[in-house]
Image: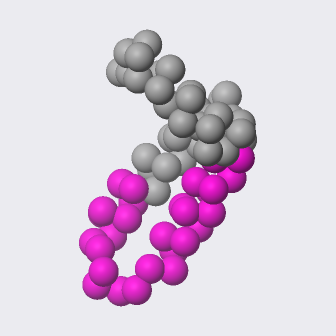
Amino acid sequence: MLNKNQLDELSQIIEDQYGKPEVLANWLDLAVEMLFYVEEDTFSRVELQEVATALMGLVRVLRGR
């Protein structure tokens, strides 16, 4: 669980670099899509699935769902 300072810092990073959470969510969506095209034997299937799951969770939070 993030504490208030971590949430504030994350919010500031998002605002400074992306303007609003939805913009970062779009970039994270693209990152998930890119994972489908990673070369074989670069990462294990489980590692890719874990990363995709984490990214999708961030996207949901950023979009307020």
Residue drawn at (58%, 54%), measured in percent from left and top? 28
- In this image, 43 relative to 13: left or right? left
Report x, y in % for residue 46.
30, 63
14 or 42, nearer to the observer? 14
Q: Is residue 24 visible?
A: yes
Residue drawn at (71%, 36%), measured in percent from left and top? 20
Report x, y in % for residue 44.
27, 72
Quadrant where the N terminus sits is top left
Residue drawn at (63%, 56%), measured in percent from left and top? 27
Q: Is residue 60 visible?
A: no
* 62 lies above or below 30: above
1 or 40, nearer to the observer? 1
Residue 40 picture quarter: bottom left
How is the structure coloured here?
one colour
Residue drawn at (68%, 53%), measured in percent from left and top? 26
Report x, y in % for residue 45.
33, 70
* 4 lies above or below 42: above
Which span of residues is magenta-colored? 23-51
| Secondary structure predominantly adopted by residues drawn in magenta | helix
Q: Residue 31 in magenta?
A: yes
- In this image, 43 relative to 7: left or right? left
Taking the view exactly as shown, the residue that stands out farthest to the front is 16
- In this image, 43 relative to 53: left or right? left
8 or 44, nearer to the observer? 8
Quadrant where the C terminus sits is top right
- In this image, 27 relative to 10: left or right? right
